[in-house]
Amino acid sequence: MQKAPKAAKWFFQFIPHLGGLKNLWKNMAFKDKHIYHADRILAGLVLQAILLAHCAKEGTGMKRTLGIITILALAAGIATNAAAKTERKDQPKARFVKETLETLGETHFPEKIKIKRITSIEVGETYYHVYEGELDKTGYHIIVFDNKRNYLGYYKSDFPPTNYQIDGSIVIDPGTVDDDGEALYFSIPIDEQKGLPPRLQIGGMPTEFVKSPTYDEAIKGAAGGGTAAEGSAAKKAEDGEEEIVPEFRTWTIAFKGKPVEARAIFVKREKNEVFLRLEATGKEKGFPLHTLSKADQEYVKQFK
């Protein structure tokens, strides 16, 4: 039987390492959306580097060159992963979250609550870290930490949070679909300046944000990339002015001459166009101001 050429033999030795390089490329290309836990990836990277170095030592000049290039790519991947991890700082592990809540007790740590890490949400130049707290009897706590490992508080919900991505929002999965079979999601939009909404409706059920006892301290120490809920809101609070916060409500919008109702939250106004985030889909959409009902137009005027 004729032996395979050396180049072909080396190629088949190299194939098992392509998966690792693919993952690293995704990590470098998409940054925060494909960050892998360091404790799960580093061991595999070190092992791959050792194997490739061995192949390079034993083989031809071409093999040695490609081995060196691959090792450099692995090193770049490790550096990129470390940089991304530094950028979002330390997302607290579920165990840390449990210990923090257990120390506070009361409503923050109900009996037999099961805590699971869900996702990190980028808002402006910071991140919010979201956890699911499954309750013993029914419902969930949607638990939120800031980017400095400070516990901010929780929302009570009948449905769990999910890692489905809607920009700048905590996403809730009610487990339902629309008429076209597409999954429906509820969202909790996080404002870059005002932070988490103090009250809203999730699936038609009103809920409030239950603040951590250390919430105000966390907000004051937010400068430099902690939570984004400071700024104008904090300034108004110090001046004794009441801060007006948007919340989900029913809007009446003229569509083809007929009034149509929709559950949404006010996002912003640009000249004569009002942008709303729809509760059913979490998507942001602009509407001409004149298409809103008179009551809705008056409501919009309070946001400057």
Image: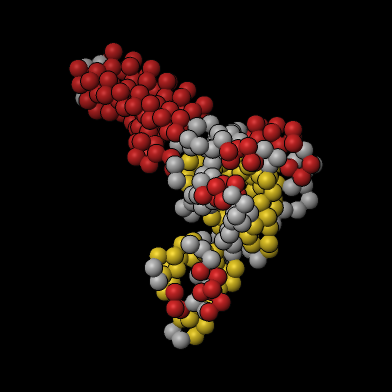
Q: Quadrant of the N terminus?
A: top left
* The one of 94 and 220 positioned closer to us in this rendering: 220
* The one of 173 and 216 positioned closer to us in this rendering: 216
Q: Residue at x 78, y 51 (%)?
A: 137
Q: Residue at x 50, y 41 (%)?
A: 127
Residue 107 in percent (x, y) is at 77, 45
- Observer able to see residue 172: no
**Please, is residue 125 above or below residue 180 in the view?**
above
Residue 124 in percent (x, y) is at 45, 46
**Please, is residue 211 above or below residue 23 in the view?**
below
**Please, is residue 71 above or below residue 132 in the view?**
above
Q: Is residue 223 left or right of residue 200?
A: left
- Observer able to see residue 78: yes
Q: Is residue 22 left or right of residue 208?
A: left
Q: Residue furthest top?
A: 57
* The one of 254 and 242 positioned closer to us in this rendering: 242
Q: Residue furthest bottom?
A: 257
Q: Residue at x 54, y 73 (%)?
A: 298
Count of marks, rendered view: 0
Q: Residue at x 45, y 68 (%)?
A: 274
Residue 209 in percent (x, y) is at 66, 51
Q: Residue furthest front?
A: 239
Q: Is residue 201 left or right of residue 7?
A: right
Q: Quadrant of residue 74?
A: top left
